[in-house]
Every structure is written in structure tokens, then in C-alpha cells.
Image (cartoon, rainbow, N blue to C red):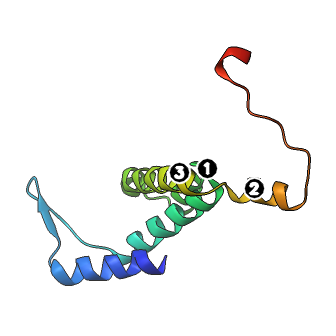
Amino acid sequence: AAFGRLVGEIMAWLFPDGILFDGILYKILPGGYAVIGAAALTGAVSHTVSTAVICFELTGQISHILPMMVAVILANMVAQSLQPSLYDSIIQVKKLPYLPDLGWNQI
């Protein structure tokens, strides 16, 4: 959230009047960047996309759903290539029984 807020503040500083697109002036809201950053971090840690939907429902702003989904999916893709999810790590630390992955020929 802090990094998202920092990006939002930089965008607000670079475009103090907002961004003009299709004749409509869109104001820069640094708080929106903070929410999107927080959703991306929690989505990356838990390896789930549902955090974007939860944050979207909490804010109630339909205009933030597309950037939030893109940020969460990109963060999820990067995190899945680098580390196991938080839940998989807890299962391994507690030495709980873990289901093996099924191959394509075993489905």
C-alpha cells in the first residue's frame, strides 16, 4: 500500500490537473493507487485473485476494478514463478499431509 501510495503521489505531482482522455479530465487519486498496491501484495502472497474482488467490494468503486485485476494478476504471475504460496509454506512447515500433483495423463 505504501509503494502504491508513493506511485500515486508521483503521478499526482506529474499531472496536477489530471489526465485528459477522450475529452474527459480524470483526476489522480493517490489513495486508489494505495488500495491497488495492497491488493496486489495480498494476491501475490496468497496466490489468489479473489483479493481483487474483495478489495473491489470494499471500496465500491467500479472504476478501479480493471487496474486492480491487472495488478493482482501480474503480481500473482510473478509470485508463482518465484515462491510457493503462504498456505503451501504453512503446510510444509507443519508437516501436514500434502496431496501430490496429478499429471496430465492421470486426470
Discs 1/2, front: 2
Q: Is residue 101 above or below residue 49?
A: above
State the residue at coordinates (44%, 74%): 34
**Is any atom of residue 107 visible in this view?**
no
State the residue at coordinates (39%, 57%): 64
Q: Position of residue 67 (x, y in %)?
A: 37, 55
Q: Residues within 10 Å of mark 2 (few under 14, many from 20)?
A: few
Image-based side of 88 in relation to 23, left or right? right
Which label belongs to residue 87?
A: 2
The number of callouts visible is: 3
In terms of sequence position, does the residue under pointer 3 or pointer 1 come before the other?
Answer: 1
Residue at which label 3 appears: 81
**Is any atom of residue 74 visible in this view?**
yes
Image-based side of 2 in relation to 107, left or right? left
Disc 1 and disc 2: Cα gap in Å?
A: 11 Å
Q: Quadrant of the C terminus?
A: top right
Q: Nearer the viewer, residue 52 or 46?
A: 46
Q: Amino acid at mark 3?
A: Ser
Residue at which label 1 appears: 48
Q: Nearer the viewer, residue 47 or 79?
A: 79
Image-based side of 55 in relation to 34, left or right? right
Q: Nearer the viewer, residue 29 or 52?
A: 52
Q: Is residue 78 above or below residue 38?
A: above
Q: Position of residue 79 (x, y in %)?
A: 54, 56
Q: Secondary structure at mark 2?
A: helix
Q: Specify the quadrant of the image occupied by residue 3.
A: bottom left
Q: Position of residue 8 (x, y in %)?
A: 32, 76
Q: Is residue 91 above or below residue 98?
A: below
Q: Specify the quadrant of the image occupied by residue 102.
A: top right
In terms of sequence position, does the residue under pointer 2 or pointer 3 come before the other?
Answer: 3
State the residue at coordinates (54%, 65%): 41
